[in-house]
Amino acid sequence: MTKKPTFAAGRNIAMKVPPHLYEATITKPLQTTLTGSLPKPAWLCEPLKLWSPWRLSGELLAEAKRDAVRLVLRDQERAGIDIVSDGEQTRQHFVTTFIEHLEGVDFEQRKTVRIRDRYDADVPVVRGPVARKRPVFAEDARFLRAETDKKTKCTLPGPLTMVDTLYDDYYRSREKLAFEFAAILNQEAREMAAAGIDVIQFDEPAFNVFFDEVRAWGIAALERAAEGLACKAAVHICYGYGIPANIAWKQTLGAEWRQYEEIFPLLQASRIDQVSLECHNSKVPIELIAMLAGKDVLVGAIDVTTERIETPQEVAATLRKALKHVAPHKLFACTNCGLVPLARPVAYGKLQALAAGADLVRQELE
Ligand code: ZN
């Protein structure tokens, strides 16, 4: 357990060690962060709707996105979140907005395919070699870094989830396409890290479904995407938003959701630094996080499928359970998934509850 004298010692040595070493050795326990997305203002796109189209275009849209990022940063700072994100205010969809900027993918003639082995979606089609014409989110990363003094986090889709959100009419191999995407993601991630971002997270909800592929090449593709990053690399794996297809899927998973048991040992042996997972109000047995020994564990203490705002005490109860398996400085208080489908006041209330719940438990450590 981290004790108060550690922090006192940290203050005493602060003058003698360079700031980055100070950060590495004296880490605040139970830092708060979020998976990535937050609701967008109604002037940017229709609220309470996933993948809602933009209301503006051109330079007006670009300016409106920057203003929305400023708003979500102020909300996170006021709520007391330690590691902040841009709330994905510049993206319509966590996978396809990135793919839209690549060559080789046709967004006009879409195909309907079953994704996540769960529901049908109209997806873009890979018709030629995929390539990145220019940076996609690097400018967003620089803007985020310039707009806050807090530690920052940026998200990218993971390679396996990308290939599961497309129809591939060119490579005809999910593995080959995943490694093509991983190389592109790595270029993007390196530019984000160079902008001064502290954590780059790859979203891999498909890891919870395709265990054979995760084992055979999914982890290797993820490591390729995160290769050589000058910041922390995270992966987020969840049970999704509260859409009907996900609710129906969860009902087939039995009394205990043990999907993480397949993946965590592989991630524990990988070069990925942090794992973000769903926990609060789920049927995930909390002891599974012990399989991530040595990694930073971002435990979901906020349910994104309900408009009900958790109490700080409920958040604290989830964190206390997790603390039985993970050391305080390796445990982060996070959300189960993105907050984008919620009303803005609800999302803000949930951020406040997350910070207040982590504060309660932190006081018990001192
Ligand atoms: Zn998620």
Image (cartoon, rainbow, N blue to C red):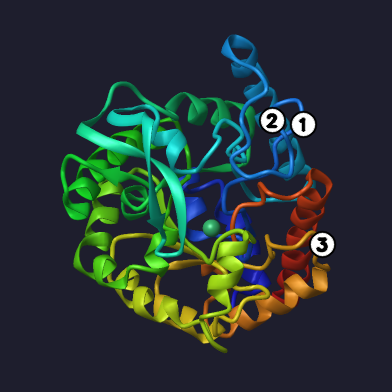
Q: Position of residue 302 (x, y in %)?
A: 69, 64
Q: Amino acid at mark 1?
A: Ala
Please say if 266 is above or below 48: below
**Marks 1/2: CA distance?**
5 Å
Q: Amino acid at mark 3?
A: Ile
**Residue 351: which numbered mark, if any?**
none
**Marks 2/3: CA distance?**
23 Å
Which comes sooner in the sequence, label 2 or label 3? 2
Outermost residue toward the top in this view: 59
**Marks 3/1: CA distance?**
21 Å
Q: Amino acid at mark 2?
A: Cys
Q: Residues within 10 Å of mark 3 (few under 14, many from 20)?
A: many
Name the residue: 56% across, 63% down. Answer: 245
Q: Position of residue 109 (x, y in %)?
A: 36, 31
The residue that label 1 is drawn on is 42
The residue that label 3 is drawn on is 309
Q: Nearer the viewer, mark 3 or mark 1?
A: 1
Whether label 1 touches label 2, CB < 8 Å: yes
The residue that label 2 is drawn on is 45
Outermost residue toward the bottom in this view: 255
Q: Is mark 3 within 8 Å of ligand 1?
A: no
Name the residue: 71% across, 70% down. Answer: 362
Q: Position of residue 17 (x, y in %)?
A: 47, 48
